[in-house]
Image (cartoon, rainbow, N blue to C red):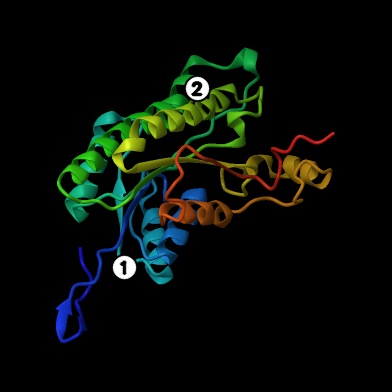
Amino acid sequence: MRRSPQRANNRVQPSPRPRVALVTGGGRGIGRGICLELAGQGLALVVNYRADRAAAEQTCRDALAHGSPIAIPIQADIALQDQSLRLIEQTLAAWGELDVLVNNAGVAPESRLDLLETTPESWDKVLATNLRGAFFLTQAAARAMIQLRSQGSLEDRQILFITSISSTFASVNRPEYCVAKAGLSMTAQLFATRLAGQGIAVHEIRPGLIETDMTHPVKEIHDARIAAGLVPMARWGTPQDVGRAVAALATGRFPYSTGTVLEIDGGIHLRVL
């Protein structure tokens, strides 16, 4: 999709097409924050959602107000590979391009159970979305991006993984979530290595304690821990904090970088004696 042509030197010059970003789980929480920051940079958006279409549609409306030329919601459960493939196909059908993939969609365990009580059902559900789903969606997106490049489209492309401090911090009452995020961190490194020669940069954004619907059930616990000094910057993070990091990477401001890890955590990862 192209914007209206502009006149320059008595010739009609088409405006550059907007960069196209697909954000999984874009309707709420961190995903919504990412979408709005990308919109502010003028990116066209595909806002993926699994079940809450109303939230995705609201994010699209807000993205337009923030500067996105167009934003559309597309339903797909990335835990199901056929739906992941359809999501990529529908994105390409709508735009003919895919410049940025943001792997943000994730689920928490339905119940926080001790490591010795974790169930296979919870394990399978969390890893299906948070790790397996993201891996195979990225595989499909990378293949599409390589094909686009072979057809002469030479713009820099980005694949971004939203992981968590749970990649490296152990929480024994949600082991399935920690294992999934740790696996996702390695997934980012693997794709960064494989795609470096294909004009596709891959990065990991590792948020700390971010105030969202997902963290609301433990807000009081972490309020007290933050007050006691857990986070050096002494506050919760926001979806906007994460979105700004994504926007900086997605707009190509680090052209000689891949495989980087951005800690968006208020300094919680610092080791202090």
Tell me which corner region of the image, top left, top right, bottom left or bottom right, holds residue 175: top right
Which residue is pictured at 45% across the width and 61% down the height?
Answer: 36
Q: Is residue 86 visible?
A: no
Amino acid type at mark 2: Ser
235 or 264: nearer the viewer: 264
Quarter of the image where the N terminus is located = bottom left
Position of 100 relative to 125 (above/below): below
Horizontal side of residue 81 vs 220, given as left or right: left
Position of 215 relative to 176 (above/below): below
Query: Where's residue 210, x and y in %?
Result: 62, 47
Which residue is pictured at 32% across the width and 36% down the height?
Answer: 197
Which residue is pictured at 80% across the width and 43% down the height?
Answer: 224
Sequence order check, earlier mark of 1 and 2: 1
Horizontal side of residue 162 vs 148, given as left or right: right
SS type, badge 2: helix
The outermost residue toward the top is: 116
Tell me which corner region of the image, top left, top right, bottom left or bottom right, holds residue 228: top right
> Mark 1 and mark 2: span between their CA atoms?
40 Å
Query: Where's residue 186, x and y in %?
Result: 48, 27
SS type, badge 1: loop
Query: Where's residue 34, x and y in %?
Result: 47, 54
Which residue is pictured at 63% across the width and 17% down the height?
Answer: 115
Q: Name the residue under label 2.
A: 122
Position of 98 relative to 118 (above/below): below
Q: Is residue 151 visible?
A: yes
Quarter of the image where the C terminus is located = top right
Circles 1 and 2 in contact, beta carbons < 8 Å: no
Q: Name the residue under label 1.
A: 69
